Amino acid sequence: MLSRGALTIVDALTTGREATPEELATDTGYTRNHIYQLLDELIAAGLLRETRRHHNQRVVRITEHPVIEQYRKLTAEFSHVDWPELLTPATMRVCWYLDEPRRITSIADRLEISRQSVHKALSPLKNRAMLSPAGPEYALNDSVQPLLEFIQAVVVHDHQNRARDLAPSTTVEWCDPDRALIRVQERHDTESLYATEEWEVTGLARFEELGLQFFLAGEPTFWYAPEETLTPAEIVSHTLVLDSGSRRVSYSLLLIESEAIDRQELTEVAAWYGLTETISEMYRYLDEEYKSPSEGKVHLPNRAEYAALKNQYGVA
Protein backbone atom coordinates (compact mmCIF):
# COMPACT_ATOMS: atom_id res chain seq x y z
CA MET A 1 0.00 0.00 0.00
CA LEU A 2 1.30 3.48 -0.81
CA SER A 3 2.62 5.21 2.28
CA ARG A 4 1.74 8.82 3.03
CA GLY A 5 5.28 9.83 2.08
CA ALA A 6 5.14 8.00 -1.26
CA LEU A 7 1.78 9.57 -2.07
CA THR A 8 3.18 12.98 -1.17
CA ILE A 9 5.93 12.51 -3.77
CA VAL A 10 3.43 11.36 -6.41
CA ASP A 11 1.24 14.36 -5.60
CA ALA A 12 4.17 16.74 -5.98
CA LEU A 13 4.91 15.34 -9.44
CA THR A 14 1.37 14.79 -10.68
CA THR A 15 1.56 17.73 -13.10
CA GLY A 16 4.19 15.82 -15.05
CA ARG A 17 7.13 18.02 -14.07
CA GLU A 18 10.64 16.75 -13.49
CA ALA A 19 12.28 17.28 -10.12
CA THR A 20 15.52 16.52 -8.34
CA PRO A 21 15.63 14.95 -4.87
CA GLU A 22 16.74 18.29 -3.49
CA GLU A 23 13.73 20.05 -5.02
CA LEU A 24 11.37 17.41 -3.63
CA ALA A 25 12.96 17.76 -0.19
CA THR A 26 12.21 21.49 -0.33
CA ASP A 27 8.64 20.92 -1.56
CA THR A 28 7.75 18.29 1.03
CA GLY A 29 9.87 19.16 4.04
CA TYR A 30 11.29 15.63 4.12
CA THR A 31 14.96 14.96 4.74
CA ARG A 32 17.08 14.01 1.73
CA ASN A 33 17.65 10.52 3.09
CA HIS A 34 13.89 10.00 3.39
CA ILE A 35 13.40 11.37 -0.13
CA TYR A 36 16.00 8.97 -1.52
CA GLN A 37 14.27 6.05 0.19
CA LEU A 38 10.85 7.05 -1.16
CA LEU A 39 12.20 7.59 -4.68
CA ASP A 40 13.84 4.16 -4.70
CA GLU A 41 10.55 2.55 -3.63
CA LEU A 42 8.51 4.39 -6.26
CA ILE A 43 11.00 3.68 -9.05
CA ALA A 44 11.05 -0.02 -8.14
CA ALA A 45 7.24 -0.01 -8.20
CA GLY A 46 7.20 1.49 -11.68
CA LEU A 47 5.47 4.71 -10.61
CA LEU A 48 8.50 6.97 -11.21
CA ARG A 49 11.15 7.08 -13.93
CA GLU A 50 14.67 8.32 -13.26
CA THR A 51 17.10 10.04 -15.60
CA ARG A 52 20.41 11.80 -15.05
CA ARG A 53 21.41 15.39 -15.77
CA HIS A 54 24.89 16.88 -15.93
CA HIS A 55 27.22 15.78 -13.15
CA ASN A 56 25.10 12.65 -12.68
CA GLN A 57 22.26 14.62 -11.03
CA ARG A 58 19.19 12.44 -10.40
CA VAL A 59 15.92 13.65 -11.92
CA VAL A 60 12.55 11.91 -11.55
CA ARG A 61 9.10 12.18 -13.06
CA ILE A 62 5.94 10.09 -12.85
CA THR A 63 5.18 7.35 -15.37
CA GLU A 64 2.02 6.63 -17.33
CA HIS A 65 1.02 3.91 -14.88
CA PRO A 66 -2.64 2.98 -14.09
CA VAL A 67 -2.14 4.04 -10.46
CA ILE A 68 -0.85 7.44 -11.60
CA GLU A 69 -3.69 7.87 -14.09
CA GLN A 70 -6.29 7.11 -11.41
CA TYR A 71 -4.64 9.55 -9.02
CA ARG A 72 -4.68 12.25 -11.68
CA LYS A 73 -8.41 11.69 -12.20
CA LEU A 74 -8.97 11.90 -8.45
CA THR A 75 -7.00 15.13 -8.00
CA ALA A 76 -8.53 16.71 -11.10
CA GLU A 77 -12.04 16.21 -9.71
CA PHE A 78 -11.17 17.03 -6.08
CA SER A 79 -8.30 19.49 -6.35
CA HIS A 80 -9.29 21.13 -3.04
CA VAL A 81 -8.58 17.95 -1.03
CA ASP A 82 -5.15 17.24 0.46
CA TRP A 83 -5.15 13.57 -0.49
CA PRO A 84 -1.70 12.67 0.91
CA GLU A 85 -2.85 13.96 4.29
CA LEU A 86 -6.20 12.16 4.05
CA LEU A 87 -5.20 8.77 2.65
CA THR A 88 -3.19 6.75 5.10
CA PRO A 89 -2.61 3.09 4.25
CA ALA A 90 -5.17 2.19 6.95
CA THR A 91 -7.81 4.42 5.37
CA MET A 92 -7.18 2.99 1.91
CA ARG A 93 -7.46 -0.59 3.20
CA VAL A 94 -10.83 0.14 4.79
CA CYS A 95 -12.08 2.13 1.79
CA TRP A 96 -11.53 -0.90 -0.45
CA TYR A 97 -14.61 -2.46 1.18
CA LEU A 98 -16.89 0.56 0.70
CA ASP A 99 -17.83 -0.33 -2.88
CA GLU A 100 -21.17 -1.38 -1.39
CA PRO A 101 -22.84 -0.77 1.98
CA ARG A 102 -21.07 -2.80 4.65
CA ARG A 103 -21.17 -3.04 8.43
CA ILE A 104 -18.19 -1.86 10.44
CA THR A 105 -18.05 -5.28 12.10
CA SER A 106 -17.87 -7.03 8.73
CA ILE A 107 -14.96 -4.85 7.57
CA ALA A 108 -13.14 -5.26 10.88
CA ASP A 109 -13.47 -9.05 10.74
CA ARG A 110 -12.25 -9.21 7.15
CA LEU A 111 -9.20 -7.05 7.89
CA GLU A 112 -8.68 -8.67 11.31
CA ILE A 113 -8.62 -5.33 13.09
CA SER A 114 -10.82 -3.76 15.78
CA ARG A 115 -14.01 -1.85 15.07
CA GLN A 116 -12.36 1.16 16.67
CA SER A 117 -9.58 0.95 14.06
CA VAL A 118 -12.15 0.94 11.26
CA HIS A 119 -13.90 3.99 12.71
CA LYS A 120 -10.55 5.77 13.09
CA ALA A 121 -9.62 5.03 9.47
CA LEU A 122 -12.98 6.33 8.24
CA SER A 123 -13.00 9.44 10.42
CA PRO A 124 -11.30 11.74 7.85
CA LEU A 125 -13.85 10.70 5.22
CA LYS A 126 -16.78 11.22 7.60
CA ASN A 127 -15.52 14.71 8.39
CA ARG A 128 -15.60 15.56 4.67
CA ALA A 129 -19.04 14.02 4.07
CA MET A 130 -17.62 11.41 1.69
CA LEU A 131 -19.55 8.51 3.23
CA SER A 132 -23.16 7.44 2.83
CA PRO A 133 -24.28 5.92 6.13
CA ALA A 134 -27.33 3.69 5.75
CA GLY A 135 -28.34 2.49 9.20
CA PRO A 136 -25.46 0.43 10.56
CA GLU A 137 -23.76 0.26 7.15
CA TYR A 138 -21.36 2.57 5.34
CA ALA A 139 -20.40 3.07 1.70
CA LEU A 140 -18.59 5.75 -0.27
CA ASN A 141 -20.76 8.45 -1.82
CA ASP A 142 -21.25 8.02 -5.55
CA SER A 143 -19.62 11.42 -6.02
CA VAL A 144 -16.25 10.07 -4.82
CA GLN A 145 -16.15 7.05 -7.14
CA PRO A 146 -12.68 8.20 -8.39
CA LEU A 147 -11.37 7.59 -4.86
CA LEU A 148 -12.52 3.97 -4.93
CA GLU A 149 -11.03 3.49 -8.41
CA PHE A 150 -7.68 4.88 -7.24
CA ILE A 151 -7.58 2.59 -4.21
CA GLN A 152 -8.52 -0.42 -6.35
CA ALA A 153 -5.67 0.42 -8.74
CA VAL A 154 -3.22 0.66 -5.81
CA VAL A 155 -4.24 -2.70 -4.32
CA VAL A 156 -4.10 -4.52 -7.67
CA HIS A 157 -0.69 -2.97 -8.33
CA ASP A 158 0.63 -4.12 -4.94
CA HIS A 159 -0.35 -7.71 -5.65
CA GLN A 160 0.96 -7.60 -9.22
CA ASN A 161 4.33 -6.36 -8.00
CA ARG A 162 4.54 -9.05 -5.34
CA ALA A 163 3.69 -11.84 -7.79
CA ARG A 164 5.67 -10.57 -10.78
CA ASP A 165 8.86 -10.52 -8.76
CA LEU A 166 8.55 -14.31 -8.96
CA ALA A 167 6.31 -14.84 -11.98
CA PRO A 168 6.44 -12.11 -14.67
CA SER A 169 3.45 -13.51 -16.60
CA THR A 170 1.09 -12.95 -13.63
CA THR A 171 -2.38 -11.47 -14.03
CA VAL A 172 -4.46 -10.66 -10.96
CA GLU A 173 -7.92 -12.22 -11.33
CA TRP A 174 -9.35 -11.20 -7.95
CA CYS A 175 -7.99 -9.48 -4.88
CA ASP A 176 -8.62 -7.49 -1.74
CA PRO A 177 -6.00 -5.69 0.38
CA ASP A 178 -4.72 -8.90 2.01
CA ARG A 179 -5.49 -11.62 -0.54
CA ALA A 180 -4.97 -12.27 -4.24
CA LEU A 181 -6.00 -14.86 -6.80
CA ILE A 182 -3.68 -14.95 -9.79
CA ARG A 183 -3.04 -16.79 -13.04
CA VAL A 184 0.24 -17.24 -14.89
CA GLN A 185 0.90 -18.08 -18.51
CA GLU A 186 4.33 -19.73 -18.35
CA ARG A 187 5.35 -23.07 -16.86
CA HIS A 188 8.53 -21.67 -15.33
CA ASP A 189 6.40 -19.09 -13.51
CA THR A 190 4.26 -21.89 -12.11
CA GLU A 191 7.40 -23.63 -10.88
CA SER A 192 8.62 -20.43 -9.23
CA LEU A 193 5.36 -20.03 -7.32
CA TYR A 194 5.31 -23.71 -6.32
CA ALA A 195 8.71 -23.14 -4.69
CA THR A 196 7.44 -20.41 -2.35
CA GLU A 197 5.53 -20.80 0.91
CA GLU A 198 3.32 -17.73 0.57
CA TRP A 199 1.61 -18.79 -2.69
CA GLU A 200 -0.69 -21.82 -2.76
CA VAL A 201 -2.29 -23.69 -5.65
CA THR A 202 -6.07 -23.30 -5.64
CA GLY A 203 -9.10 -23.74 -7.90
CA LEU A 204 -9.53 -26.96 -9.87
CA ALA A 205 -5.84 -27.84 -9.50
CA ARG A 206 -6.38 -28.16 -5.71
CA PHE A 207 -9.25 -30.67 -6.07
CA GLU A 208 -6.77 -33.54 -6.47
CA GLU A 209 -5.65 -33.17 -2.83
CA LEU A 210 -9.31 -33.61 -1.88
CA GLY A 211 -9.76 -36.78 -3.90
CA LEU A 212 -11.07 -35.34 -7.18
CA GLN A 213 -8.66 -35.30 -10.11
CA PHE A 214 -9.60 -33.69 -13.43
CA PHE A 215 -7.80 -33.04 -16.69
CA LEU A 216 -6.61 -29.44 -16.57
CA ALA A 217 -5.49 -27.36 -19.51
CA GLY A 218 -3.02 -24.52 -18.92
CA GLU A 219 -1.30 -23.44 -15.72
CA PRO A 220 -2.92 -23.70 -12.26
CA THR A 221 -4.29 -20.79 -10.27
CA PHE A 222 -2.46 -19.51 -7.19
CA TRP A 223 -3.72 -17.92 -3.99
CA TYR A 224 -1.97 -15.41 -1.73
CA ALA A 225 -3.18 -15.20 1.85
CA PRO A 226 -0.19 -16.22 4.00
CA GLU A 227 -1.98 -15.63 7.29
CA GLU A 228 -4.93 -17.90 6.46
CA THR A 229 -5.65 -21.59 5.93
CA LEU A 230 -7.01 -22.43 2.48
CA THR A 231 -10.37 -24.15 3.06
CA PRO A 232 -12.60 -26.17 0.71
CA ALA A 233 -15.09 -23.27 0.79
CA GLU A 234 -12.36 -20.91 -0.48
CA ILE A 235 -11.34 -23.42 -3.17
CA VAL A 236 -14.93 -23.62 -4.46
CA SER A 237 -15.17 -19.82 -4.49
CA HIS A 238 -11.87 -19.48 -6.37
CA THR A 239 -13.03 -22.04 -8.93
CA LEU A 240 -16.29 -20.24 -9.62
CA VAL A 241 -15.10 -16.63 -9.52
CA LEU A 242 -12.78 -17.42 -12.43
CA ASP A 243 -15.48 -19.10 -14.49
CA SER A 244 -18.98 -20.18 -13.49
CA GLY A 245 -19.61 -22.28 -16.59
CA SER A 246 -21.36 -25.65 -16.36
CA ARG A 247 -18.13 -27.68 -16.11
CA ARG A 248 -16.80 -25.77 -13.12
CA VAL A 249 -20.23 -25.70 -11.47
CA SER A 250 -20.49 -29.50 -11.79
CA TYR A 251 -17.02 -30.04 -10.33
CA SER A 252 -17.76 -27.60 -7.50
CA LEU A 253 -20.97 -29.47 -6.70
CA LEU A 254 -18.91 -32.66 -6.42
CA LEU A 255 -16.52 -31.00 -3.98
CA ILE A 256 -19.37 -29.56 -1.91
CA GLU A 257 -20.84 -33.05 -1.54
CA SER A 258 -17.59 -35.00 -1.11
CA GLU A 259 -16.31 -32.60 1.57
CA ALA A 260 -19.76 -31.94 3.07
CA ILE A 261 -19.03 -28.20 2.95
CA ASP A 262 -21.25 -26.34 5.39
CA ARG A 263 -23.80 -24.21 3.56
CA GLN A 264 -23.51 -21.21 5.86
CA GLU A 265 -19.71 -21.25 5.74
CA LEU A 266 -19.61 -21.40 1.94
CA THR A 267 -22.30 -18.74 1.63
CA GLU A 268 -20.33 -16.35 3.86
CA VAL A 269 -17.07 -16.97 2.01
CA ALA A 270 -18.67 -16.73 -1.43
CA ALA A 271 -20.25 -13.36 -0.60
CA TRP A 272 -16.80 -11.72 -0.76
CA TYR A 273 -16.48 -12.97 -4.35
CA GLY A 274 -19.93 -11.84 -5.47
CA LEU A 275 -21.11 -15.45 -5.66
CA THR A 276 -23.97 -15.42 -3.16
CA GLU A 277 -26.67 -16.12 -5.74
CA THR A 278 -24.57 -18.77 -7.47
CA ILE A 279 -23.99 -20.72 -4.26
CA SER A 280 -27.64 -20.38 -3.24
CA GLU A 281 -28.78 -21.92 -6.53
CA MET A 282 -26.23 -24.71 -6.27
CA TYR A 283 -27.49 -25.74 -2.83
CA ARG A 284 -31.08 -25.55 -4.06
CA TYR A 285 -30.06 -27.91 -6.85
CA LEU A 286 -28.47 -30.32 -4.36
CA ASP A 287 -31.60 -30.11 -2.20
CA GLU A 288 -33.61 -30.96 -5.34
CA GLU A 289 -35.66 -27.78 -5.13
CA TYR A 290 -35.35 -27.40 -8.91
CA LYS A 291 -37.33 -29.78 -11.08
CA SER A 292 -35.12 -28.76 -13.99
CA PRO A 293 -31.65 -27.12 -13.91
CA SER A 294 -32.86 -24.57 -16.46
CA GLU A 295 -35.11 -22.99 -13.82
CA GLY A 296 -32.17 -21.11 -12.28
CA LYS A 297 -29.68 -18.57 -13.63
CA VAL A 298 -26.61 -20.73 -12.92
CA HIS A 299 -25.37 -23.28 -15.47
CA LEU A 300 -26.40 -26.35 -13.48
CA PRO A 301 -25.87 -29.85 -14.86
CA ASN A 302 -28.54 -32.20 -16.12
CA ARG A 303 -29.62 -34.56 -13.31
CA ALA A 304 -28.62 -37.70 -15.20
CA GLU A 305 -25.25 -36.23 -16.20
CA TYR A 306 -24.50 -35.17 -12.64
CA ALA A 307 -25.48 -38.60 -11.29
CA ALA A 308 -23.07 -40.19 -13.78
CA LEU A 309 -20.33 -37.76 -12.73
CA LYS A 310 -20.84 -38.61 -9.05
CA ASN A 311 -20.66 -42.29 -9.88
CA GLN A 312 -17.46 -41.77 -11.90
CA TYR A 313 -15.70 -40.05 -9.00
CA GLY A 314 -17.21 -42.19 -6.25
CA VAL A 315 -19.06 -39.33 -4.55
CA ALA A 316 -21.90 -40.65 -2.41
Image: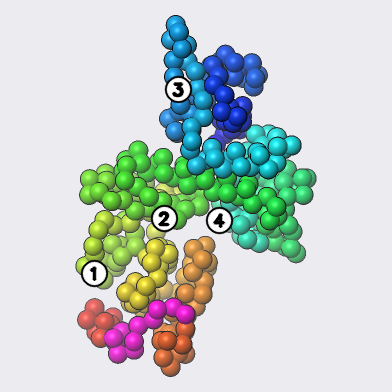
**Type of amino acid at the residue the image marks with label 2:** Glu
Q: Is residue 111 magenta?
A: no
Inter-mark Cα distance, 2 to 4:
19 Å
Q: Nearer the viewer, mark 3 or mark 1?
A: 3
Residue at the (43%, 30%) spot, across then down: 44
Q: Which residues are magenta?
A: 297-307
Residues at circles 3 and 4 in contact by the CB criterion of under 8 Å: no
Residue at which label 4 appears: 110
Would residue 82 be found to the left or right of residue 228 on screen?
A: right
Q: Nearer the viewer, mark 3 or mark 4?
A: 3
Pick the residue in front: 200 or 246. 246
* Disc marking residue 50: 3
Q: In terms of sequence position, does the residue under pointer 2 or pointer 4 come before the other?
A: 4
Residue 179 location (% of width, % of height): 46, 51
Residue at which label 1 appears: 214
**Type of amino acid at the residue the image marks with label 1:** Phe
Q: Is residue 191 visible?
A: no
Would residue 280 be found to the left or right of residue 90 on screen?
A: left
**Type of amino acid at the residue the image marks with label 4:** Arg
Q: In terms of sequence position, does the residue under pointer 2 or pointer 1 come before the other?
A: 2
Inter-mark Cα distance, 2 to 1:
22 Å
Crowdedness of circle 1 by 10 Å Cα count: few (<14), some, many (20+)?
A: few
The quarter of the displayed image where residue 12 is located: top right
Residue at which label 2 appears: 173
Which element is circle 4 on?
helix
Residue at the (37%, 73%) spot, across then down: 245
Which element is circle 1 on?
loop
Q: In terms of sequence position, does the residue under pointer 3 or pointer 1 come before the other?
A: 3
Residues at circles 2 and 3 in contact by the CB criterion of under 8 Å: no
Which element is circle 3 on?
strand
Residue 107 location (% of width, % of height): 61, 56
Q: Nearer the viewer, mark 2 or mark 1?
A: 2
